[in-house]
Amino acid sequence: MSWATEFVELSKTKHDRNVFDCGEQALNTFIRTQAAKHMQAGISRIMVLPSAQPLLNQKFAICAFYSVAPTSIRRDTLPSPLAKKLPRYPVPVFLLAQLAVHKAFHGSGLGKISLIRALKYLWEVNQHMPAYAIVVDCLTNSAHSFYTKFGFQVLCEHNGCIRMFLPMKTVEQLFPS
Ligand SMILES: CC(C)(COP(=O)(O)OP(=O)(O)OC[C@H]1O[C@@H](n2cnc3c(N)ncnc32)[C@H](O)[C@@H]1OP(=O)(O)O)[C@@H](O)C(=O)NCCC(=O)NCCS
């Protein structure tokens, strides 16, 4: 199985959500049973990288996905040199809520590709509605070490997860206009 060239919005009719397996039960359950409902409710956007060829049921497998939503953080969770430049009310950020790769592709560079595509997507949204940073909530130590590798820094503890952030000014350097 090989993957298509572009991430597209999740479609219940086009994408086979049930065969996705990234090895993390919470993320498998999310894409199989919750993601479409979240989109329908208008609370997040889920982008998937389909397989290049359809399965026997004519749907496309999901090789990787990410989900994004707007949120805000408290100014005082940021390191003080950054916090002191910001006003004393909630700071708008983008939440990269989930990112996962089908385990058949682990170690083949698709995690990195998916993260770069997610950052680019949010960078483009930022052109229309600016946010201060991108935050991620790490469910596992492995997720923490993955995001650390790509420059995310620890922000705070959030609902039992380590919340990390990457300032939008850093993202800007990746995609110069
Ligand atoms: C984390 C995950 C997305 C990585 O995907 P992947 O396709 O295996 O990663 P890649 O092959 O693109 O690796 C890119 C780089 O990150 C490194 N890397 C991969 N997983 C890593 C991890 N858990 N910790 C640290 N580095 C990691 C690779 O060594 C590689 O480094 P290199 O560019 O120097 O060679 C994938 O393992 C996954 O879906 N895990 C389950 C879900 C999850 O934990 N998601 C993140 C939190 S929501």
Image (cartoon, rainbow, N blue to C red):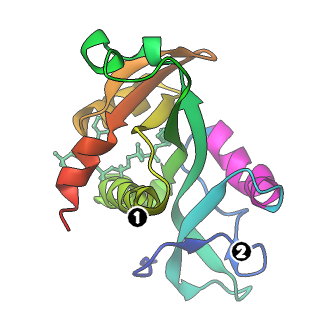
Q: Nearer the viewer, mark 2 or mark 1?
A: 1
Residue type (three-letter) at the residue carrying disc 1: Glu
| Of 73 and 63, the residue lying toward us | 73
**Residue under the point 56% across and 25% down:** 90
What's the mark number on residue 11?
2
- Furthest toward the front, the residue is 87
Image quarter for residue 174? bottom left
The x, y position of residue 154, in whole percent, is 36, 20
84 relative to 18 in the view: left or right: left
**Residue under the point 70% across and 72% down:** 16
| Of 46 and 88, the residue lying toward us | 88
Using a 10 Å C-alpha cutoff, classify the residue at mark 2 as few (fewer than 14 neighbours), some (14 to 19) or many (20 or more): some
Whether the residue under disc 1 has CB within 8 Å of ligand 1: no
| Of 79 and 112, the residue lying toward us | 79
Residue 103 in sight here: yes
| Of 53 and 165, the residue lying toward us | 165
Tell me which secondary structure the magenta stretch mostly adopts: helix
Residue 80 belongs to the span the image colors magenta: no
Q: Earlier in the sequence, mark 2 or mark 1?
A: 2
What's the mark number on residue 95?
none
Q: Which residues are magenta?
A: 25-39
The quadrant in which the C terminus is found is: bottom left
Quadrant containing ligand 1 reads top left
Residue type (three-letter) at the residue carrying disc 2: Ser
| Total numbered badges shown on the rendered structure | 2
What's the mark number on residue 124?
1
The CA distance from mark 2 to mark 1 is 22 Å
Residue 37 belongs to the span the image colors magenta: yes
